[in-house]
Amino acid sequence: MASSPVARAQTEEAFLDAAERLLVDVGYAGITTRRLAQEAKANHGLVHYYFGSMENLLVRVLERFTERLTARQRAMYSDPEIPFLEKWRQAMRYLVSEDVAYEKVWLELQALAWNRPELREQVARVNEEWREVLTEAFAEPHERYGIDMPLAALVSLVITFNEGIMLERAQGISEGHKELLAWIDGWLAAKEVR
């Protein structure tokens, strides 16, 4: 067992990094304690000692990944020098190209939580974090563009839209995605020039 707080922290990070890679490469069903330990180059007994269960470790991977991305999104959306249209375009670039690993982790953990009620609350907190980010990001454009729906409904629509694209892409489906993104971009661009 790791003997110092520094060694423990390093080992925990190694497990989290390894689990993140494995979630992307083989999914949660393909991860065993031994496989994870081998990937992390650590003692397999430490998984349960440090995290309590494999599921707790996997949820921590999702939380850690989400913390990084929500911080990035908040910084991007809060920059007053960048027009909202450019922020939206950047967010869509993240969605369709840069955040594919995160999306796989997110979908894997959602699927895991469907049948594990004890994990649902933890995964739901990640969803709430994203809703907070988008509520902050869309409050001003919601008002400025005169979008005729409650802000909470708009945020729900955007989350559902993003998850729909993520789920279809995970299934190898991309038909209509470019066209949909182009249509939304055109709609936002028309709103910007008013």
Image: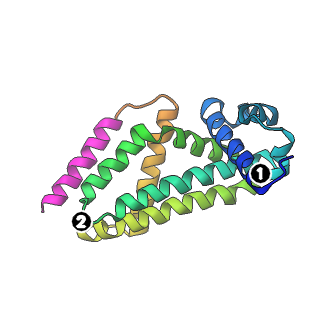
Q: Residue 78 carries which label?
A: none
Camera-nearest residue between 147 and 137: 137
Query: Looking at the magenta stretch, what is its main secondary structure?
Result: helix
What residue span does the magenta drawing correspond to? 177-194
User: Picture coordinates of residue 134 (x, y %)?
Assistant: 42, 62
Identify the residue under disc 2: 145
Residue 183 lies in the magenta stretch: yes
Horizontal side of residue 18 vs 131, given as left or right: right
Q: How far apart are marks 1 and 2 (CA)?
A: 50 Å
Identify the amino acid type marked 2: Tyr
Q: Which residue is drawn at 81% across and 48% down?
A: 53
Camera-nearest residue between 100 and 149: 100
Quarter of the picture holding the C terminus: bottom left
Looking at the rendered structure, the secondary structure element under dot 1 is: helix
Query: Label 2 crowding class (10 Å Cα cut-off): few <14, some 14-19, many 20+?
Result: few
Identify the amino acid type marked 1: Arg
Query: Label 1 crowding class (10 Å Cα cut-off): few <14, some 14-19, many 20+?
Result: some
Camera-nearest residue between 133 and 48: 48
